[in-house]
Image (cartoon, rainbow, N blue to C red):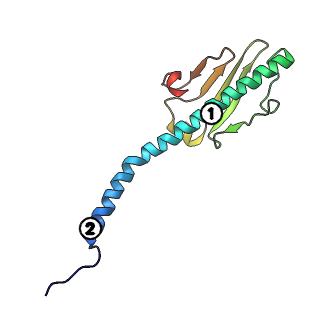
Amino acid sequence: MIFKSNGFNLIELLITLSIISILMAMSYPLYQHHFIEERRLEAAHALMQLSLAMEKYQFENNTYVGATLNQLKMEEYIAKNNYRLMILKATSEDYLLAALPLGTQALEDNDCGTLQLNSRGEKSVTGINKAEACW
């Protein structure tokens, strides 16, 4: 007597689940890396916007001193609260802006660290990567 099977047996199901698990394990880090880069680019864009706002403030007040994120109508926490915008230095002639990574972004993006932009348009990072790779 020969039995005819209409479904999957346990071995076939386990092999299929194993293959799916291996593929997910390989693709998940790439997926996470994409989000890390996306948030970093959003922070870089926000720094550029803040730089423009600082230039407008300087044009209207003839100094960078006294500029705050609130006055410039800029959000302090950006990129879904993964970065914090800061004005590190503001003098009559120049400024230094920063986007500080927070939470998981700070833990997983050690290569770039804090993004910085000064009044001369020079971009830098506090991580081990070069600025060009992070911006």
Furthest toward the top, the residue is 93
Q: Which residue is mark 1?
A: 43
Q: Is residue 5 above or below residue 102?
A: below
Q: Residue at x 55, y 26 (%)?
A: 135
Furthest toward the left, the residue is 1
Q: Quadrant of residue 99?
A: top right
Q: Is residue 49 above or below residue 65?
A: below
The disc labelled 2 sits on which kind of residue? Glu
Residue 111: image x %, image y %? 49, 30
Q: Which residue is mark 2?
A: 12
Q: Quadrant of residue 91?
A: top right
Q: Residue at x 76, y 25 (%)?
A: 53
Residue 23: image x %, image y %? 35, 52
Q: Image check: 63 left or right of 51?
A: right
Q: Residues within 10 Å of mark 1 (few under 14, many from 20)?
A: many
- Could you say whether the residue bearing mark 1 is in a helix, strand or loop? helix
Q: Image check: 15 left or right of 39?
A: left
